[in-house]
Image (tube, rainbow, N blue to C red):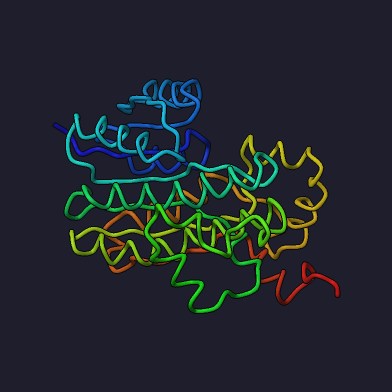
Amino acid sequence: MKDVMILTGAGQIGMAIARRMGFGKKIVVGDKSLKNAETIAKIMNEAGFDVTPVEMDLSSRESIKNLISEALKYGEISMLVNAAGVSPSQAPVESILKVDLYGTAVLLEEVGKVIKEGGVGVTISSQSGHRMPALTAEQDELLATTPAEELLSLEMLQPENIRDTLHAYQMAKRCNEKRVMAEAVKWGERGARLNDIAPGIIVTPLALDEFNGPRGDFYKNMFAKCPAGRPGTADEVANVAELLMSPAGAFITGSTVLIDGGATASYYYGPLKPQE
């Protein structure tokens, strides 16, 4: 039996983190597209890793539990890398909330029930959650602690209160960060840690779709006017994950690390500030 890493979302960021931290472990990769999971598994297996692909739908608790059961066949789960999700131009409001908000909450909860002592998880949110006005303390607490099955019934998440897919995405990512804080307390009871990484624009096939899509100019303007002056790479996100998931990060839990080339700073205090 080996220690097991669960990787959800067969994309560039998830794979970069899995390659950095998954050596010597059994890696079970779950994605809604089995083909995508098989592609990542093949690349990694040919580079010396031990990866098994599984079809998994993040919006379904049953599907998440099946993924965890599959992982437990190989040993104890010592790592979770959650990089699954849909973007504002990929999906309607309802899907974004079901996958990114509800699904992530369920995944953190279910893995938290079985995570090994000394285990660690990271989930990928987004700089987007930092781009909307602050919620009230009460709203933040609701996002953090409402039982997962009741989350989508919250008044603030009803269709009449969500402006568009970007707003839905921002709410989902804000919820991810609050959820990580609340779940980190529960994971701590098992001697495990959980953190969140909020990337800005990272070049991936998904981002390239966005660059070439209707919002392309908006994204290009964002990285041109951020202090770094460029988009980021999946490996730079993996650098942060490596700190958070290694013994060097042993005192970090329940935190969100923003890695966006300074785009959020520029949005509030620089050239990206929205003009009234």
Rendered image quadrant of residue 186: bottom left
Nearest the viewer among 132 and 151 is: 151
Rendered image quadrant of residue 3: top left
Which residue is farthest left?
1
Give the side of residue 90 with respect to residue 1, left or right: right
Point 16% across, 54% down: residue: 117
Give the side of residue 170 with respect to residue 216, left or right: left
Location of residue 206 in the rendering, given as x and y in whole percent from the top left corner: 64, 37
Location of residue 169 in the rendering, given as x and y in whole percent from the top left corner: 61, 53
The quarter of the rendered structure image containing the C terminus is bottom right
Location of residue 151 in the rendering, given as x and y in whole percent from the top left corner: 46, 57
Give the side of residue 110 with respect to residue 239, left or right: left
The quarter of the rendered structure image containing the N terminus is top left
In this rendering, the answer to whether 200 lies above or below 66 is below
Location of residue 205 in the rendering, given as x and y in whole percent from the top left corner: 63, 34
Give the side of residue 249 with respect to residue 55, left or right: left
Point 29% across, 53% down: residue: 120
Point 33% across, 28% down: residue: 49
Point 18% across, 59% down: residue: 190
